[in-house]
Each structure stands twice: as structure tokens, then as C-alpha cells.
Image (cartoon, rainbow, N blue to C red):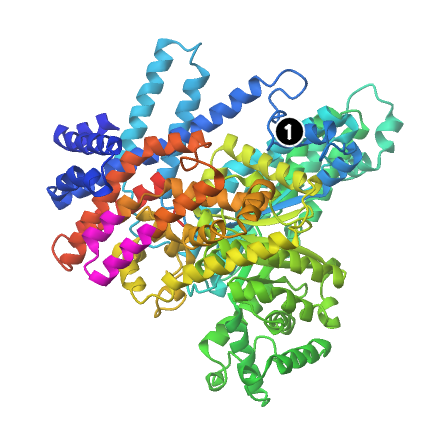
């Protein structure tokens, strides 16, 4: 990178970059106070002109972007090295038998020792594994900060590094030279690529970018992983314990194009477009796979078999009937119409999309000519599989054909079904318009009991409230129907139009009552939805979580609602982001835990199975945990039960699934964790521990809210000391930064809230309130109980360890620099000083409880990563504060656009350095 900068921008620019880097490294070695540590760096940056701010910020941002690519490659390299030293007992090159968080490792452990020394039978483990499902729901927010163009270039860098590994010991000098030159070209291309997104993405482009990982990586990686899982199961338990073709350990969904909560850009037509675009992609990918199969299994069944045996097979008869009795290539003849129908399916979906976009008016393909149900396609592929097995060719059947069957099972004909998400107030407003139109008064003025009674009566009645497609969109309807209500009603009309598996769940954000859930069921039914989407309440704030059990108990006491549940299954979404923003990390995590335990009791009471949908972000402040295995196993007992649905968001999608080796490892960890969770005995906390958690939660919540909500200095401090106000210029998502245009911190979305604090390295939302709670208890007679909880209760220890990890990545001296440069209000400055004292007290409290002398002292990899990254991020932080100062002092100046570029570049660079956005 240095060579490229020198070639394109001159030695002078590179010299400045190197000077800053060396000053940052030297400052890290000093023991003086934080401000003295940064003095030379700050002085140097103040002397740079605006254009130099841009180019030097670009240098550090790209250094970190390429470093991320190199680190990802190293992780994959280490995974391969681990596999080559695990021995030669049947798993070489498959899954990691010696790793605690690998499926093979979990199976080995339970088969040998079980849980607490009690062995678990092969049959029990097998039945658990083949029936469990992990559903990964891809969401756009927080959108990846790096442009797709750069991600593709980083991917090519890793590919070059992979090739270098492969020829390290055997390659010729010419081959090594070619790779060196290829790497130089790629780095040069990265440097000449604009890292700033100039145009805000549309929901359609978000969906296009968000599903790229499915098409380019997971489409091949998932069947590869399942093949290895099958091999591991057979190796450890016996050949009769293979993975059935019809098992679905993983399925995928998406919110991109369906999530309209606070995003006016997601209209009914946007959802229609994304659904059709996904069908086009899926049909094209499947057509390619089927045509590949035609070449692989094109011949006749093996010669020498008795004709009666060959034709006795029902499956083979089906193949012959379609292919023709005299066909010399029956399988190719059988599959050719399948491939042609898939081609027609993509063409039909494209025509429908063009009609929707106004590019065309007619379609010459009917729905009868295409695939609309994946079951039809799966049945045809299973027929080929069975016929091959029946004619003595199982080895062919269980090759590429098995992979394709598993791909269809996971992705279907839609690639990913879209969840619909909308705020509860929107549904209430729509029903209010309807009741007024019908002369029944104002739904919004009714109390909860009246709302539930009226909706229940309507659900029991077969009479529609409104004529489908009429009334609310006719001329003159504005007298009764608001624009918001019309959009909501059209959304339900759109749902009714969609074909099988285009849509998944209907998630209700800001859900607070049984009527909120019943409203969505009624609006679906009234719109003519033949198979209503499952209605999923999202409980987000602390109050919502604490009231969730009562809400669901009331809901499940209504016979007409119970009757609407398919298989007596109810999905409930637990919100991690907004609850932490509302009450602080410690209080939120305890509320999430208790809510799931209480809801499980409600489920038992009503003989209903609850499936929990975990709305976790990538960061700890939004419910994330870099240790996925421990995070899943630490969930409350009896709340996962083999069904784990979770969001994968923004930059985490690329980190976890952007590269084949890493994607396969992520799938393995998820599978292992859900398997281990079901067979790991974890008692519920004792009353003493629950009382202690209630106490910690109350203290931490009060301390958190005292600052965030109760201190009049906080909002001015937050606005001035962080780049929050400027984040809206970073075109990384289609959603507005706020749910409402007006309002303060309370209306700010959880993502920019977290993102802003990450930029200043203070990470306030993750730890604020935690230290006060721990210190108060450690200085009381309850000290022993708290220390025992940390040692013996994995769930509590995981929460504290995560806070410790974030504190080890934080840097109060950097935050102080932001305050000194950007905050002018003396009262806000005083608050900043107080917050940093709280931060220091929290560090001491955490280390006291954990027994560590240095934060995260046992996490050697994290400490090494931060040691390498910190000097680069320090430079970006100093560049960012200087840029913010100039922007705020010289608004509307001739250099404003240049300074904006510098700011957005530093924001991207810090996000790359810290490993997350929000």
C-alpha cells in the first residue's frame, strides 16, 4: 500500500503517513496522561491542509481495510492447519473433532462423557441433530460501511493470498512473481477506488447487495458443509447415522425489501420488486445446477442389471415415462424439462418485474408453465435420486445431486423469503380509519378490552370489513383514509398477491398489547391472504419486555387466535438493540433472559411451542457476542429447543459469510451450539441469584438513565462530542437515522446511537451503569453472592466478560480528545469528565469481579489485535476530530465538500479498525 501511495501521490504524502504512524506508535509506548500522549500527533494534523486530510485519511482507512482481509485469510489458514493436525481417524478435512465449538467436537464430547459425566446415546444425539434448525435472517442495518466494489477487491486479495499458500513450497519463481504482481495490481486498484458512497442506497439495491453472499458463497458452501456434517456423523456414530437429504439444519430469510419500520422508502411495490428479483436469481442458479447434473448423470443405469430390477423401481418408472422407454440417456431426458422450466421461471419473473416497473405491459408466460412451489422441484430431484439408488448407483446419487437437493431445501425458489416488519401504530391507524368509515367510532379511542373484543368478533365472522382492492383507494376516500393507512392496507393487499414462500413472518415492532397482534391477523384475513403470515410480536423496550408474558398470556387465552396458529407454534421476537438503548446493557440483558423464561411458562400453560427470534446486532451494545457458541449455550434453559432464529446484520454478514472457509466455520459453530444447548444441563438461577440480578438491574438502569435521560447536559454533550449529526451523510443505509424527524436521543435508532460512540472509542452504551451496580454490591454484605455468581453461572459471567471485552477496546483518552476539540459548552465538558471517571470506575469494578489485573488479560488474540490496530485507529481519530472541527467552524465554505469526504473516510476507517459499525 505504501508503494502505491508513493507512486500515485508522491513521496511527500507517504512521508506524512509514515510520520503519523510512527508518532502514534511512540505515543502508545508512553505512560503519560492521555492528552500528553496525543499532543505531537494533534499538532501535526493541525498543520495539514484539507486535501491532505482526505488523502492521509484514505491511507489509514485502506490500511485497515486490507488488514481486515489479511486477518480473515489468516483465520481461514489457521482453520485449515487445525484440520491437518487433528489425526487420521476419519475426520481429516471434515469438521474439527477436537474443537469444543465444532459439531464434531460436541458429538465426540457427548458420546464420550455426555453432560456432567452422563453419556448421551447415539440415537438421542442423532434425533436432536436432524430435527434442529437455525434460521439466519439477513438485515441491511447497519449496512456494511465498505462499498461493494471494495469488498470484491478485498475478496480478490484473499484469493491471491490463498494461491500463495498453495504454492508456498512447490511454486516456481515465475508463479511467485505473478502472484506478487497480481497483489500489487489489486492494491493499486483499491487505492484508486472511491471509498465514499456518493448515493444513498435504495431498499432494492440494499437487497441486491445483501443477498450477494448467498449467491456467491453460501450457495456452494452450505451443501459442502452439510456433506462434511454427514461424514462426521457417520464417522462418529456409524454409517446408519447419516444426515437425511430432507433435513434442514439451515434456512435463510431476509428483511431487506420487507422491513418498513420507520423506513418510508420501503413501499408495497418495493417488496413486490425484491420478491421477483429474488425469484429470478434463484431460478437462474438452480437452472445452472440442473444443467450441470445433466452432464454428470447423463448415461443409462449400469449394465448387467436385470431388466426387471431396473424397471421395477417406481422412481425409475417415472424417469422412463418422462424420458421415453427408448431414451439412451434417461436421466438427461428427465432433467432437461426441469432445466427448461427453471429457465422459463426466471423469464416469467423478469417479465413480471418489468411490468411492475413500467418497462413492459404484457407477459407471454403463464403461471402454469413455471415453478411456484419448491415441493414440485424437490420431488422431481428426489425421483432421480431414488432411481439412481434403486439401480445400484447410490454413489452418483449422493454426489452433486444430493448437494442440489439440499440447496433447494434451504433456499427454495425464492432465495430468501422476506419478513414484513411494521410499527404497531400503523396497524392501529388503519383500523381507526376503517371503524370510522363503518360508522363504529374511533378504534384509537377504545380501550384494550374493547379492541380485543371487536377484533375477535371480526375474526369469527366471515364478512369482510372492506371490499378487497376498493373503498380505501377509491376517489374521495381521503375523507376517511389517511395516506399512512392507505399504504398499510396496500401492504396487506401485496401480501395476498405473493406466491408461496415469497414472504416469511410479519413482525410487529413496538408491540405492547394483545390487540397489536390480533390487528395484523385481522388485516391479513380482510385483505384475502390465503395462508396468513405468522404474526410475530417484537418486544423491545424494558417495559415491553417486562410486560411480554402478560400480553402473550392474554393473547393465547383467545380461542380464535389459538386456532390460527399453525402447528400450535408461536414466534416471539426479543429486541436487543432498543432495550439496551432504553435501559443499559446489564438491565436489558437480564430483562431479555427473564422474559424468555416467563414466556416459556406461558407456552407450557397454553400447550403452545414458542420459537424465539433474536434481534441481535453485531456489537455487544446491540446484543452481539463474538463468541457465538457461548452466546447460544448461555441462553435460558428451555428457550431454544432446537429452533434458533437470529438476525445477521450489515458488516457481520460479510465477516461471517463473505468467504467460503469462514462461512463454513460459522455454519459449524451455529450447528454445534444449538446441538450442545439442548444437551447441556443449566439450572435456572436460584432465588438468591434472581434477587441479586434484580438488584444489579435496578441500580444499573437508574445509573444509566440518570445520565442519558435525566442529565440536561447529556444531549448537548452527545451531539458535540461525537459525529452523530454527521452520520446521516454516510450513505450506508436506506433508512433515516431517526424513527421521527424530530426528537432527541430517545427517537434515535439504536444503530447510529452505537455507531457514534464507537467512533469516539468510548463505547458508552455498552458499559454505562454496569460499574455502579457492581461496585455497590461488592461493597455490601452481598459481595460473596456476586462473586459466586460470576464463578458458577455461565450466563452472568458471559455478560460481564463481554463488557470487559468492550472496555479493553475502549480508550477514554481518545474520547477526551474529542471533548477538548469539539465541546465548547462548559457544562457539557464537565459531564464528559464525569463520564470518564465513571468509565475508569467501571474498569476497576470489572477487574475486581473477574480477578484480572489487566482487562481481558486471558484473551491474547484480542490484545494482540488491538496492539496492532490501535496506532492506525488513533491516527484516524485525530484526523476525524480535526475534520469535524473545521466542518463545524466553516459551514458553507468552499472546502466543505472536501472536508465531508475526509470525515466520511475517517468514519469508514474507524469502523474498519474497530470491526463494526453499529
**Residue 115 visible here:** yes
Q: Residue at x 86, y 26 (%)?
A: 307
Task: Please state the horizontal and vertical placement of residue 348, each as a whole percent of the image.
Answer: 56, 52
Q: Secondary structure at mark 1?
A: helix
Q: Residue at x 61, y 59 (%)?
A: 595
Tell me the quarter of the image containing the N terminus. top left
Q: Residue at x 79, y 29 (%)?
A: 240
The magenta segment is 816-837
Instruction: Identify which residue, 203 or 282, lies in the foreground.
Output: 203
Task: Please state the horizontal and vertical placement of residue 855, each as a whole percent of the image.
Answer: 41, 37
Total label count?
1
Extreme-front residue of the structure: 781
Find disc 1 in the rendering and name its residue: 105
Q: Is residue 612 above or below residue 31?
A: below
Task: Please state the horizontal and vertical placement of residue 416, each as a whole percent of the image.
Answer: 56, 49
Instruction: Identify which residue, 503 or 709, lies in the foreground.
Output: 709
Q: Left or right: where does residue 105 sit relative to residue 266?
A: right
Q: Left or right: where does residue 640 sit relative to residue 445?
A: right
Task: Please state the horizontal and vertical placement of residue 322, each as a whole percent of the image.
Answer: 75, 39
Amino acid at each position: 500500500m505504501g508503494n502505491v501511495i508513493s507512486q500515485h501521490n508522491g513521496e511527500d504524502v507517504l512521508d506524512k503517513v509514515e510520520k503519523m504512524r510512527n508518532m502514534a506508535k511512540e505515543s502508545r509506548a508512553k505512560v503519560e496522561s492521555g492528552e500528553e500522549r496525543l499532543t505531537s500527533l494533534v499538532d501535526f494534523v493541525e498543520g495539514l491542509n484539507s486535501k491532505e486530510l482526505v488523502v492521509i485519511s484514505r491511507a489509514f482507512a485502506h490500511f485497515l481495510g486490507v488488514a481486515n482481509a489479511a486477518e480473515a485469510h489468516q483465520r481461514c489458514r489457521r482453520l485449515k492447519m487445525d484440520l491437518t493436525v487433528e489425526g487420521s481417524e476419519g475426520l481429516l478435512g471434515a469438521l474439527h473433532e477436537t474443537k469444543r465449538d465444532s459439531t464434531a467436537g460436541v458429538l465426540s464430547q457427548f458420546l464420550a462423557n455426555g453432560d456432567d459425566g452422563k453419556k448421551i446415546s447415539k440415537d438421542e444425539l442423532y434425533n436432536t441433530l436432524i430435527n434442529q434448525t437455525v434460521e439466519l435472517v439477513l438485515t441491511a442495518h447497519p449496512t456494511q460501511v465498505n462499498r461493494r466494489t471494495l469488498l470484491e477487491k478485498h475478496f480478490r486479495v484473499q484469493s491471491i493470498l490463498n494461491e500463495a499458500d498453495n504454492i508456498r513450497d512447490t511454486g516456481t519463481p515465475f508463479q511467485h512473481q505473478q502472484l506478487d504482481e497480481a497483489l500489487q495490481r489489486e492494491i493499486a486498484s483499491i487505492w484508486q477506488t472511491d471509498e465514499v458512497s456518493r448515493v444513498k442506497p435504495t431498499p432494492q439495491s440494499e437487497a441486491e447487495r445483501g443477498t450477494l453472499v448467498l449467491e456467491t458463497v453460501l450457495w456452494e458452501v452450505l451443501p459442502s458443509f452439510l456433506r462434511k456434517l454427514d461424514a462426521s456423523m457417520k464417522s462418529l456414530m456409524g454409517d446408519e447415522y447419516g444426515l437425511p437429504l430432507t433435513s434442514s439444519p439451515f434456512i435463510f430469510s431476509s428483511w431487506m425489501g420487507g422491513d418498513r419500520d420507520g423506513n418510508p422508502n420501503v413501499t408495497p411495490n418495493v417488496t413486490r420488486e425484491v420478491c421477483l428479483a429474488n425469484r429470478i436469481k434463484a431460478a437462474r442458479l438452480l437452472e445452472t445446477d440442473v444443467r450441470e447434473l445433466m452432464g454428470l448423470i447423463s448415461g443409462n443405469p449400469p449394465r448387467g442389471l436385470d431388466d426387471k430390477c431396473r424397471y421395477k423401481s417406481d422412481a425409475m418408472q417415472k424417469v422412463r415415462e418422462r424420458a421415453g422407454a427408448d431414451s439412451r440417456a434417461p436421466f438427461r431426458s428427465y432433467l432437461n424439462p426441469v432445466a427448461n422450466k427453471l429457465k422459463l421461471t426466471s423469464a416469467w419473473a423478469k417479465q413480471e418485474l418489468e411490468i411492475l416497473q413500467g418497462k413492459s405491459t404484457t407477459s407471454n408466460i403463464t403461471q402454469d408453465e413455471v415453478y411456484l412451489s419448491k415441493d414440485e422441484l424437490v420431488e422431481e430431484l428426489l425421483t432421480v435420486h431414488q432411481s439412481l439408488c434403486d439401480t445400484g448407483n447410490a454413489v452418483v446419487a449422493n454426489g452433486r445431486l444430493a448437494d442440489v437437493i439440499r440447496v433447494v431445501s434451504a433456499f427454495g425458489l425464492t432465495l430468501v423469503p422476506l419478513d414484513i416488519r411494521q410499527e404497531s401504530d400503523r396497524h392501529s391507524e388503519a383500523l381507526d380509519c376503517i371503524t370510522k368509515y363503518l360508522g363504529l367510532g374511533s378504534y384509537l379511542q377504545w380501550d384494550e378490552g374493547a379492541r380485543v373484543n371487536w377484533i375477535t368478533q371480526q375474526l369469527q365472522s366471515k364478512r369482510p370489513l372492506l371490499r378487497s382492492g376498493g373503498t380505501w383507494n377509491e376517489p374521495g376516500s381521503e375523507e376517511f383514509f389517511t395516506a399512512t393507512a392507505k399504504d398499510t392496507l396496500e401492504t396487506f393487499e401485496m401480501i395476498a398477491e405473493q406466491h408461496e414462500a415469497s414472504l416469511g413472518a410479519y413482525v410487529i415492532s413496538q408491540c405492547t398489547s394483545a390487540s397489536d397482534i390480533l390487528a395484523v391477523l385481522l388485516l391479513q384475513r380482510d385483505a384475502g391472504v390465503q395462508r396468513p403470515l405468522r404474526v410475530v410480536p417484537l418486544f423491545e423496550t424494558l417495559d415491553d419486555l417486562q410486560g411480554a408474558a402478560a400480553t402473550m398470556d392474554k393473547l393465547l387465552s383467545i380461542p380464535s387466535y389459538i386456532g390460527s396458529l399453525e402447528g400450535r407454534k408461536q414466534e416471539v421476537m426479543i429486541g436487543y438493540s432498543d432495550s439496551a438503548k432504553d435501559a443499559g446493557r446489564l438491565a436489558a440483558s437480564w430483562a431479555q433472559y427473564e422474559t424468555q423464561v416467563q414466556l416459556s411458562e406461558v407456552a407450557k400453560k397454553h400447550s403452545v411451542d414458542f420459537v424465539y427470534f433474536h434481534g441481535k446486532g453485531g456489537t455487544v451494545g446491540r446484543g452481539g457476542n463474538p463468541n457465538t457458541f457461548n452466546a447460544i449455550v448461555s441462553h435460558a434453559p428451555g428457550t431454544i429447543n432446537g429452533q434458533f432464529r437470529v438476525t445477521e446484520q450489515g458488516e457481520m454478514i460479510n465477516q461471517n459469510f463473505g468467504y467460503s472457509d469462514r462461512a463454513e466455520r460459522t455454519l459449524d459453530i451455529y450447528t454445534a451450539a444449538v446441538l450442545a444447548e439442548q444437551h447441556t444441563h443449566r439450572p435456572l438461577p436460584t432465588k438468591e441469584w434472581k434477587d441479586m440480578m434484580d438488584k444489579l438491574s435496578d441500580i444499573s438502569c437508574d445509573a444509566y438513565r440518570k445520565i442519558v435521560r435525566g442529565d440536561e447536559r447529556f444531549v448537548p454533550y452527545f451531539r458535540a462530542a461525537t459525529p452523530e449529526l454527521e452520520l446521516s451523510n454516510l450513505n450506508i443505509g436506506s433508512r433515516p437515522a431517526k424513527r421521527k424527524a424530530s426528537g432527541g436521543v430517545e427517537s434515535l435508532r439504536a444503530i447510529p446511537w452505537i455507531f457514534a460512540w464507537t467512533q469516539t472509542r468510548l463505547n458508552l452504551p455498552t458499559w454505562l451503569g454496569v460499574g455502579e451496580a457492581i461496585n455497590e454490591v461488592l461493597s455490601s454484605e452481598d459481595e460473596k453472592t456476586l462473586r459466586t455468581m460470576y464463578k458458577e453461572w455461565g450466563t452472568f459471567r458471559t455478560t460481564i466478560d463481554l463488557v470487559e471485552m468492550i472496555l479493553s477496546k475502549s480508550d477514554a483518552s481518545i474520547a477526551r480528545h474529542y471533548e477538548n476539540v469539539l465541546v465548547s459548552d462548559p457544562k457539557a465538558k464537565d459531564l464528559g469528565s464525569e463520564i470518564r471517571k465513571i468509565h475508569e470506575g467501571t474498569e476497576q469494578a470489572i477487574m475486581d469481579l473477574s480477578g484480572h489485573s489487566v482487562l481481558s488479560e486471558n484473551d491474547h488474540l484480542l490484545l494482540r489485535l488491538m496492539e496492532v490496530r490501535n496506532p492506525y485507529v488513533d491516527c484516524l481519530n485525530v484526523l476525524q476530530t480535526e475534520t469535524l472541527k473545521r466542518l463545524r467552524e466553516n459551514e458553507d465554505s468552499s472546502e466543505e465538500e472536501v472536508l465531508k469526504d475526509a470525515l466520511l473516510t475517517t468514519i469508514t476507517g474507524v469502523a474498519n479498525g474497530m470491526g463494526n459499525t453499529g
